[in-house]
Image: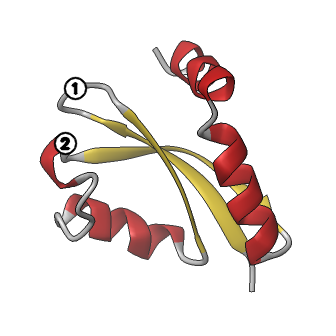
Amino acid sequence: MGYYVYILKSRVNGDLYVGSTANVINRLRLHNDGKVKSTKGYRPWVLLETRVCATRTDSMSLERFLKTGQQKELLRQKYK
């Protein structure tokens, strides 16, 4: 079983969201169905990228890293 870090972009305001999961398709559905409190108001979301990780711990570490200020800014530049 793999774990993934995913990057979403809001079609409403262009915000990016970084998360981790074992099932990207199901998680994207939850975001777009309004079942995730932090992203509910910015639906719909588009999946931009997924990164495969060997373990849940690895995926959570990568997620935290990508949410740091410098990395978040690099993602914003990449997905303008």
Query: In the figure, is residue 37 to the left or right of 48?
Result: left
Query: Can you name the residue that lies furthest to the bottom here?
Result: 1
**Vertical placement of 11 versus 32: above or below?**
above
Which residue occupies 41% across, 70% down? 27
Residue highlighted by disc 1: 13
Query: In the figure, is residue 54 to the left or right of 5?
Result: right
User: Helix, strand, or loop for circle 2?
Assistant: helix
Residue highlighted by disc 2: 42
Find residue 57 and report its horizontal and vertical position in percent.
78, 72
Nearer to the camera, 57 or 52: 57
Which residue occupies 64% across, 19% down? 74
Residue type at mark 1 is Asn
Query: Can you name the residue that lies furthest to the right here?
Result: 54
Which residue occupies 24% across, 33% down? 11
Find residue 17 and report its horizontal and vertical position in percent.
43, 43
Residue type at mark 2 is Tyr
**Vertical placement of 58 versus 66: above or below?**
below
Find residue 33 and report its horizontal and vertical position in percent.
18, 66
Tag on residue 34? none
The disc, 1 or 2, on the residue closer to the chain's N-terminal end is 1
Query: In the figure, is residue 12 to the left or right of 16?
Result: left
